[in-house]
Image (cartoon, helix red, strand yellow):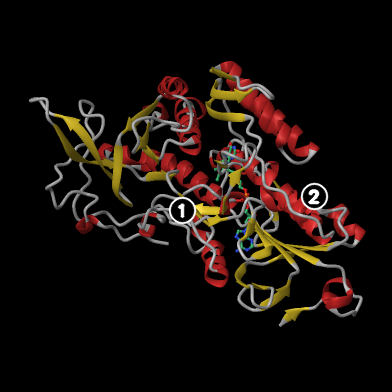
Amino acid sequence: MTLSTSSLTGTGSTRAQQKPRVVIIGCGFGGLEAAKALSGADAEIVVIDRTNHHLFQPLLYQVATAGLPAPAIAGPIRHILRKQIARGNLTVLMGEVTSIDTASNCVVVDGGEHIHYDHLIVAAGATHSYFGRDDWAKYAPGLKTLGDAFTIRRRVLTAFEQAERETDPSKREPWLTFAVVGAGPTGVEMAGTLAEIAHQTLSTEFRRIDSRVARIILLEGAPRVLGTFTEDLSKRAKEQLEMLGAEVLTGAKVTDINAFGIRYDLNETQADGSSKVVSHFLPSRTVIWGAGVAASPLGRALAKSTGCQLDRAGRVIVQPDLSLPGHPNIYVVGDLASAKSYLDPANPTAVPGVSPGAKQMGRKAAFNIIRRMRGLETHAFRYFDYGSLATIGKRAAVAMIDVPYTRKQIKFSGFAAWLFWLFVHVYFLIGFRNRMVVMMDWAWAYFTSQRHARVFPDPHALEPNAMVVRVTPPSVPPVSVTAATPINTVSSSSTSAPGSPVAQPSVSR
Ligand SMILES: Cc1cc2nc3c(=O)[nH]c(=O)nc-3n(C[C@H](O)[C@H](O)[C@H](O)COP(=O)(O)OP(=O)(O)OC[C@H]3O[C@@H](n4cnc5c(N)ncnc54)[C@H](O)[C@@H]3O)c2cc1C
C-alpha cells in the first residue's frame, strides 16, 4: 500500500499538486534537528521513528544505573513536535523503516506500508557491534536504547540481590564482580558509577553481604582509557576511576563471554623479560558491553538500492553536502553518515559520531533541501567542534574545550570538569521539566549518594529477550578468585574451565 497524500493531509489531491514531501527516518539528534529546521519550509514533513520517544543518549547510563527515571531523559516525539503538528505540516508515524525503494521514491514501513518521499533524510543512528560475536549480546548487553538501560539496571541490581541470597562464597563472588568491556566514554561512565553504587549507595542496605567488596573491572583492548582524549586526560581518567574503586585493565582483548564470565587475552612480561599472551577467565555474572558501534542496517539497505559506498563500520559515505552520489534528494546524517567537514575546503576532516555532529548535520540537510526546493545550489557541511567531555563519577570528569575563533584548547579534570559536565548536560536536555527533575535528582544524589530509580519490573514477567538470573549450575564449578590473584587466571590450554564451550550454561529466559 502506498500512503497517499490524502491519508496524511485529508486534501484528496494528487501528489503532483501537493507540497513536496520530506520524509525523515529517525527522530534522534539528527532527525529532530532536521524536523525543527524544516518547520518554516513550504513542505509536508513526515517523521518516522520505531519508538515513540526522542532519547537523550548521553544520560542513558544514568537510567541504567538507577540515577534517573527514563522520562527525565526521553520525551514523546509527538509532544516535542506538537507545534508543527498543530500547524498541519508535520506528521509523526511510529514504525520501523525496513527498506528504502529509491526506484519509486518510497520508504517501506514494517515490511508493508510504502510512504512516498520527494526528499529523504535518513537519520537512523547506530547500533552495537559485537565484532562478529552476536552470541555475546545476551550475556553482555550494550547501552543504546531505553530497553537496554532497563536490562542493565535490572541485571546490576539483581546481581546484588543474588549475592545476598547465595551462601557459598565461591558462587557469591561472581555475582559481586561486574565487568565493563570498552573504556570509551560509556564504559568509563558505567564503571565509575557502578563503583559508586557498590561502595556508597548500597553500602548499608544488605545484611549478609558487604556491597563494598564488589569488584568493578573495566577492560579495554587499547593501551589507555578514553582513547579520543589527550594522554594526560586519559591518565587522569584512569586515576579517578581507581579512586572511585574501579579496576582498570588496558591491553585486554576479550575472546569470549558467557553466562559465567569473560575470557580475555593479556600480553604479559615473563620472568625472562620476554612477553607472552596469557588467557584469563574472570568469573562475573554481570558483563556490560561498551566496546563496539555499528551503523544502522539501513546503511546496507541504502547501499543496495543506490550503490552508495559504506565505510568499515557500515556508515554511508556521503557527498560534501550530505547527499548520496547520484541521489541529490537523499541525505544521510548523524551516526549513520561517514561525513567530512569542509570548514577548511582544502583539508576536509572526518566528523565524529557525537550528538553535536548529528544535530549540525540534521540542520544542514534541512537547509540544503530548502535550497534545492528553491532551485539553489546546496552547501558543503561544516562541523563546529566545541570539544569533548566525559564524566567518571561524582566529582570526577575530564574536559577538552576548544575556545571559539582561536586554535586554543582548555583541558581540565576533577571537580571543575564534573561541574561543567553537569551544566552542559542539563542545558542540552529537552524540556524545562526534565531539566528541573534532573537537577533535583542530582542535587539529592550528591548529598545522599542515593539513586532513586532503583526499581525494575518483576523478572518473571519480563519481555522474551530478558535473561532471568537463575542459571543451571555449570558442569564444571567456576574457579574462585583468591585475594592474592585479583583476576583469576586460567591457562589458555585448559579446556574445561568456565568460559570454554563445555561449561556453557542453560539460561532460563
Ligand atoms: C550511551 C551513549 C552515550 C553517549 N554519550 C554521548 C555524549 O556524552 N556526548 C555526545 O556528543 N554524544 C554521545 N553519544 C553519541 C550520540 O548520542 C550520537 O552521536 C547521536 O545520538 C547520533 O544521533 P543520530 O540522530 O544519528 O542517531 P540517534 O540519536 O541514535 O537516533 C536514531 C533514531 O532513529 C530511530 N531508528 C533507528 N532505526 C530506525 C528504523 N529502521 N526505522 C525507524 N526509526 C529508526 C531510533 O529509534 C532513534 O530514535 C552517546 C551515545 C550513547 C549510545
Q: Quadrant of the C terminus?
A: bottom left
Q: Amino acid at mark 1?
A: Ala
Residue 154 point in image, percent of width and height: 50, 47
Res 76 seen here: no
Task: State yes or no: discs 1 and 2 in contact (Cβ < 8 Å).
Answer: no
Where disc 1 sits, the SS reads loop
- Left or right position of 158 against 374: left
Q: Residues within 10 Å of mark 2 (few under 14, many from 20)?
A: some
The image's mark for residue 313 is: 1
- Left or right position of 91 against 491: right
* Residue found 47% across the figure and 26% down from its top: 203
The image's mark for residue 111 is: none
Q: Which residue, as the protein is rendered here, is positioned at the far front?
A: 346
Residue 124 point in image, percent of width and height: 61, 57
- Left or right position of 195 against 443: left
- Left or right position of 307 against 370: left
List the residue tagged with mark 2. Answer: 37
